Image: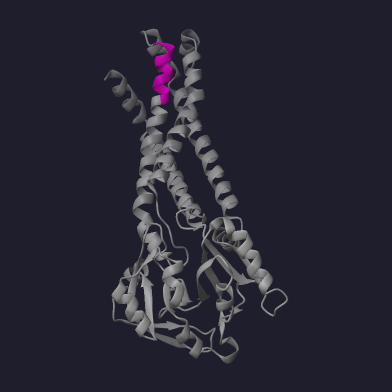
Amino acid sequence: MKFMRILLANLLRKKVRLFLTVGSFSIALFLFAFLGVIHNAFSIDSAIVKADRLIVVNRTSWFNTTPVSYKDKILQIPGVKSITHYTWFPGVYRDDKNIFPSFVIDPAGQRQVYPEFLVPEDQWQAFLNDRQGAIVGAETAHRFGWKIGDRIPLISTQYGVGTWEFNLVGIYHGQLPHTDQTEFWFRWDYFNEKVPPEMKGQVGWYILRIDDPSDAVRIAKAIDQQFANSPHETKTDSESVFAANMVKQFGNIRLLITSIGVIVFVTLLLVTGNTMAIAIRERTRELAVFKAVGFSDFAVLLLVLAESLLIALIGGALGLLLAFLAMPPLASSLSGLLPGLVLAPRLLLLGLLLALFVGLLSGLIPGVIAMRMRIVAAMRRV
């Protein structure tokens, strides 16, 4: 009890300095959590990426299209179980700020290739029966307050048509918590009849499922060889490689996030270490008195470390709490640009452990100095 009273008295002695140090920890841990969430959003999650899925894109660039006639030819290759195709649709809802991932899909193979997207059977049948039907992810539906039966206008200038009208007939949910629930789907036949003549019969990329993941290399080579020397040559990769290439379009995100994280960590360490060093220097004579009245060297070290750890714990907890409260609105505002922003419990735990580690490290050197000082020499200091 006496030890805790001394600890609290030391902490509250310089309230402004305590506030600034705790604030430094809070900001640093908030940045750590935010960067961790962004890193996870750009990372490939093994629970999402399937080993039995392959992606077929135009060899020149995935921005270029491939003929829809490739679908039947790919299906004839031994080992291919099901196939669908996607086409990127750059549409916005009423305002340029209201963007989200919009895709033209092939309903025939969608559910076989992507079983993790759960659509109620009656809604899926309504989608098949309505040429202008659309299905949207639960997060995007919640974001705009959409419900079944709404008429959804999307504005696009890329395909020569100003406004596209859709009937919202379904809302899909993810099988897993981190499954992307922000996409907007509509039918390829409706898309194909409205686009300019040069775009008709073209799709963005193919996604296929195979019987045996270990046979992926052979199947990929067979697909690319079949369309070699054609006007639309293909490049087939596993889903994980395709997703990794998509991330590379944004640059080396992992290096950038790691560099910022290291800078934050080192800065926090220097700030906290300097604060503790100043605090120990101010209390040199006081610590000498503690040792004179019977406090052991280890008790003095423990007192300094406990003060540093308590500052780290309070500041780290506040920063992580702020990140926890800020993440839902942030994820909602960025869902059209960067889906999958989730602050995982393991990230919170890692952040708290990092804060305690920094607190321990920053208090260790001042604590050792305080532990080793001689009583007589310390009492002479002014």
Query: Is residue 297 on the magenta stretch?
Result: yes
Query: Is residue 322 on the magenta stretch?
Result: no
Residue 208, percent from left and from top: 52, 68
Which residue occupies the foreground of this view, 357 or 184?
184
Query: How many labels were placed on the picture?
Result: 0
Q: Which residue is pictured at 36% across the width and 26% down the height? A: 10
Q: Residue furthest right?
A: 229
Is residue 119 left or right of 188 when viewed as pictured?
A: left
Q: Is residue 91 above or below residue 266?
A: below
Is there any visible trace of residue 146 in the rendered image?
A: no
Residue 69, percent from left and from top: 58, 81
Is there any visible trace of residue 191 in the rendered image?
A: yes
Q: Which residue is pictured at 36% across the width and 8% down the height? A: 293
What range of the chain is rendered magenta? 296-305
Q: Predominant secondary structure in magenta?
A: helix
Which residue occupies the foreground of this view, 356 or 280?
356
Is residue 370 left or right of 290 when viewed as pictured?
A: right
Residue 215, percent from left and from top: 58, 58
Residue 36, percent from left and from top: 47, 49
Quadrant showing the N terminus: top left
Q: Residue furthest left?
A: 1
Which residue occupies the foreground of this view, 144 or 178?
178
Q: Is residue 299 above or below residue 114?
A: above
Q: Is residue 165 above or below residue 219?
A: below
